Image (spheres, rainbow, N blue to C red):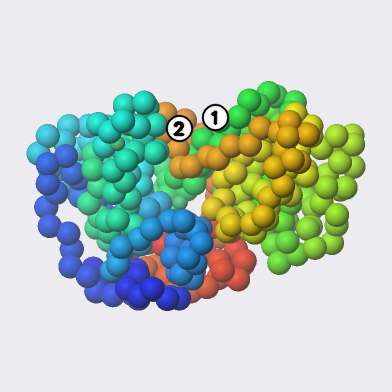
């Protein structure tokens, strides 16, 4: 089977013929991939960005935003059956470690993450633990189902803040996670959603504008001033940093109102940061990473019902054999979300 494989600790990927995985072991399921999204993390692996704080063992088939069909179930699997259409968590948690027992499956101590520690879904077949799988409706197209994973990241960020309808929201970074966060903010009843990006993000900022967001170009406007002008002089109630850019946490603290909340979602490189600004504004800052099992259940409902309509985000559908084109296009900030399908 043709697979997008990371083999070298340098820029690029190889499209290689790889053996199909053999039958699933106990607790595991063999999936036939319907679609696999290209994530920001995959772009980090492609570019080989050392800062991102995410680890990968090589050689490795990339891809963790997988939607597909159950082909074969190992022993003791009873939650899914062959023919079921599913989406998969990157690692559903071992269920036994201290953090899983605390209910924080996203922080499991034994991460076997898909497309990082084990082979992922940018190919035809992939092995996944049953615990990671969530069924989706039969009518749900695979490309939309593949976007449930990043939609869950956006939802989880909301699960971690105190948000009330009528609050104002700013989102730094108009990539897929940023735009999904802006869409969730709209669904959740935000009175105002401001999306900030670079001039190079013009196409993505335009998508945000079409969604009804206010848009600020960081290259052309003073972001803090422009945001205050839009929010009665105070700044926004909640800022989500989904940019992955350097120094954006400082900008997020600039944009938030005194007493407001900042959620760091993107994996940004280290940068200097002034803690006093956080103290004197009494800002609450927190990180949000991946999502919880319950987030999947909500994300599937929202995407399947198209209350969270991800179709405008899926700008590129390409076969695995053209993965390099997908990566280069996204790194050029053209398009929004690319989804790969097996050749
Ligand atoms: Zn992802
Ligand atoms: Zn665990």
Pointers 2 and 1 in contact (CB under 8 A)? yes
Name the residue beneath numbered marker 2.
295
Q: Is residue 337 above or below residue 164?
A: below
Looking at the image, residue 107 lies above or below residue 222: above
Residue occupying image coordinates x 66% and y 38%: 262
Q: Where residue 238 sits in the image (x, y, percent)? A: 70, 35
Q: Residue at x 63, y 54 (%)?
A: 243
In the image, 210 versus 337, the foreground residue is 337
Residue nearest the observer in this picture, 11 or 269:
269
Residue 32: image location, x then y, percent: 26, 54
Specify the quadrant that holds the N terminus: bottom left
| Residue 222 as seen in the image, left or right of residue 112 | right
Q: Is residue 220 visible?
A: yes
- Give the side of residue 27 with respect to residue 85, left or right: left
296 sits left or right of 128 in the view: right
Task: Identify the mark at residue 180; answer none if there is no mark.
Answer: none
Sequence-wise, which precedes: disc 2 or disc 1? 1
On screen, 163 above or below 303? above
The picture places residue 97, in percent across and down from the top left corner, at 28, 33
Q: Is residue 12 above or below residue 256?
A: below
Residue at 11% of width from left, 52% of height from top?
Answer: 23
Q: Quadrant of the C terminus?
A: bottom left
Left or right of residue 46, residue 17 in this image: left
Q: How many marks?
A: 2
Query: What residue sits right under mark 1 in the picture?
Result: 159
């Amino acid at each position: 089977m043709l697979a997008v494989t990371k083999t070298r600790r340098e820029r690029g990927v190889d499209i290689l013929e790889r053996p199909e995985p053999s039958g699933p072991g106990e607790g595991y399921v063999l999936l036939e991939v319907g679609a696999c999204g290209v994530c920001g993390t995959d772009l980090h692996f492609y570019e080989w960005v050392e800062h991102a704080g995410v680890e990968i063992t090589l050689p490795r088939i990339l891809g963790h935003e997988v939607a597909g069909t159950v082909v074969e179930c190992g022993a003791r699997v009873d939650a899914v059956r062959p023919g079921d259409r599913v989406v998969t968590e990157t690692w559903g948690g071992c269920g036994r470690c201290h953090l899983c027992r605390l209910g924080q499956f996203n922080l499991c101590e034994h991460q076997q993450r898909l497309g990082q520690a084990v082979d992922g879904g940018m190919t035809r077949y992939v092995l996944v633990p049953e615990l990671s799988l969530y069924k989706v409706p039969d009518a749900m197209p695979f490309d939309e189902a593949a976007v449930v994973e990043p939609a869950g990241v956006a939802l989880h960020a909301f699960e971690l803040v105190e948000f009330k309808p009528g609050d104002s929201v700013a989102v730094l970074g108009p990539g897929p996670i940023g735009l999904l966060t802006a869409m969730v903010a709209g669904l959740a009843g935000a009175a105002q959603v401001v999306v900030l990006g670079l001039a190079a993000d013009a196409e993505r900022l335009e998508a945000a504008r079409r969604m009804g967001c206010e848009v600020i170009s960081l290259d052309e406007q003073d972001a803090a001033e422009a945001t205050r002008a839009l929010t009665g002089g105070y700044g926004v109630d909640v800022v989500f940093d989904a940019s992955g850019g350097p120094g954006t946490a400082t900008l997020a603290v600039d944009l938030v109102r005194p007493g407001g909340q900042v959620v760091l979602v993107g994996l940004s490189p280290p940068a200097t940061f002034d803690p006093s600004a956080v103290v004197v504004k009494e800002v609450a800052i927190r990180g949000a990473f991946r999502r919880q099992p319950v987030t999947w259940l909500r994300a599937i409902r929202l995407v399947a019902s198209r209350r969270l309509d991800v179709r405008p985000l899926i700008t590129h559908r390409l076969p695995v054999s053209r993965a390099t084109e997908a990566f280069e296009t996204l790194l050029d900030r053209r398009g929004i979300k690319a989804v790969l399908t097996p050749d």
